[in-house]
Image: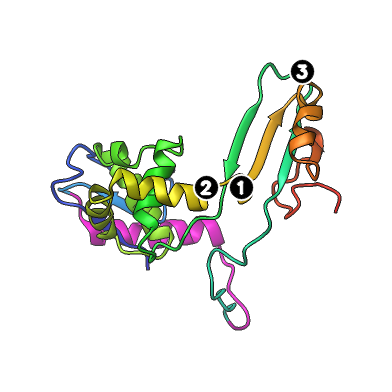
């Protein structure tokens, strides 16, 4: 059964109104509500409307699949992917490293370091009802409790600059990072190849986001 959650006081700016008819659009599996909404009514609407819209008369057959023991999956070696987009005026560059478990004592420090390095502003998102709702929704999708949003805020407030620097120096290193560059490869590929000789180039027309290799030939 779907759940509708009320976060009293901290999301009062969000005054969500819902159309509970079958024709309603834009209803998501989890509703983060401000005061004044009926969570049981919203949850019932989610169950009825979404189940019919997404699954129709389909019924599951056989046993439920076994969930992986580790949600993040097995660690993979760093990769360098270049998505070739000829004629692009600039390139988009993303560097990513495998993070630590949320249960790790280092998680708050790494989260703060990630924000400083350009990975988003967790603290700023907590300042608005919409941003807080997005945080709570993200926690739910990870199988965590909405109350963890409050706990995360307290943990972040306790992080020192020294702790953030230390975890960044340990985890956020070139050797650990996968690099994704999207742009006109003719303008940078030679220099990048000297730094990352094992890079893989994928023409934008062949990019497959549903493939583990993204369309690259093994």
Find the residue positioned furthest to the bottom.
63
Residue behind mark 3: 87
Q: Main secondary structure of the magenta part?
A: helix
Relative placement, left or right, of 187 versus 117 is right
Upstream in sequence: badge 1 or badge 3 = 3
Residue 178: percent from left, percent from top: 64, 46
Q: Is residue 60 above or below residue 77?
A: below
Q: Using the numbered discs, state the Cα–Cα distance from disc 1 to disc 3 in whole angstroms.
A: 27 Å
Mark 2 element type: loop
Q: Are marks 1 and 2 in contact (CB under 8 Å)?
A: yes
Which residue is identified by label 1?
A: 177
User: Looking at the picture, how far across and down is residue 51, in whole percent?
Assistant: 47, 62
The residue positioned farthest toward the right in the image shown: 217
Q: Earlier in the sequence, mark 1 or mark 2?
A: 2
Secondary-structure class at tag 3 = loop
Q: Residues within 10 Å of mark 1 (few under 14, many from 20)?
A: some
Q: Give x and y (percent) for residue 32.
A: 29, 50
Indicate which disc residue 188 carries: none
Residue 207, by quadrant, is top right
Residue 172: which disc? Answer: 2
**Image: magenta residue range:** 37-63
């Amino acid at each position: 059964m779907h759940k509708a959650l009320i976060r009293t006081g901290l999301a009062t700016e969000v005054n969500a109104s819902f159309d509970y008819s079958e024709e309603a659009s834009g209803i998501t599996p989890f509703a983060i509500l401000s005061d004044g909404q009926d969570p049981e009514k919203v949850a019932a609407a989610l169950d009825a409307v979404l189940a019919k819209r997404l699954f129709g008369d389909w019924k599951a057959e056989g046993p439920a699949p076994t969930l992986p023991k580790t949600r993040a999956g097995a660690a993979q070696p760093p990769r360098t992917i270049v998505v070739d987009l000829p004629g692009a005026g600039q390139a988009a560059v993303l560097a990513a490293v495998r993070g630590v478990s949320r249960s790790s004592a280092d998680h708050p420090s790494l989260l703060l370091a990630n924000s400083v390095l350009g990975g988003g502003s967790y603290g700023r998102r907590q300042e608005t009802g919409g941003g807080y709702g997005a945080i709570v929704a993200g926690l739910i999708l990870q199988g965590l409790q909405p109350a963890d949003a409050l706990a995360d805020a307290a943990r972040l407030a306790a992080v020192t600059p020294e702790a953030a620097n230390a975890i960044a120096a340990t985890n956020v290193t070139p050797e650990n990072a996968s690099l994704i560059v999207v742009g006109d490869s003719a303008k940078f590929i030679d220099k990048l190849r000297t730094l990352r000789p094992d890079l893989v180039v994928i023409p934008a027309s062949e990019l497959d986001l549903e493939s583990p290799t993204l369309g690259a030939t093994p």
